[in-house]
Image: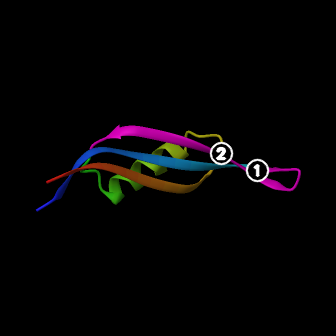
Amino acid sequence: MASINPVSTSIRMTLDLGVVDGKAVEKSVNISNLDNEVTAEKVDAVVTALESLLEYPVIETKQYETGLLVE
């Protein structure tokens, strides 16, 4: 039976830089090499803590998990 072994976990925060010429401007900030067992609550705590240090507000956070399919 096949299974997936976790390889890496990262998060991507999207920042709202405002509006320029009528278009929304966004920037992404990536944090990689996270523990593969990270929970949504821990990610939220990290994003909340970092948000207070960032110049622009975080409008979206995505978590990416990479795994290796083994048989």
Judge left or right: residue 67 versus residue 64.
left
- Give 39 or 10, whichever is nearer the viewer: 10
Check residue 28 for magenta coloring: yes
Element under label 1?
Answer: strand
Magenta residues, as a range?
A: 19-35
Q: Quadrant of the C terminus?
A: bottom left
User: Magenta-highlighted stretch: main secondary structure?
Assistant: strand
User: What's the distance in space between the residues labelled 2 and 1, CA to CA?
Assistant: 9 Å
Q: Badge 1 is on which residue?
A: 18
Quarter of the picture containing the N terminus is bottom left
Left/right of residue 71 with respect to residue 22 in the rendered view = left
Q: Nearer the viewer, residue 45 or 10?
A: 10
Q: Answer few, some or many: residues within 10 Å of disc 2's Cα (few below 14, many 20 plus, some between 14 and 19).
A: some
> In this view of the protein, which residue sits in the foreground, 65 or 54?
65
Which residue is painted at 40% across and 51% down in the image?
Answer: 64
* Farthest residue, direction left: 1
What residue sits 17% from the left and 58% below the top?
Answer: 3
User: Label 2 belongs to which residue?
Assistant: 56
Residue visible at 35% across and 59% down? 40
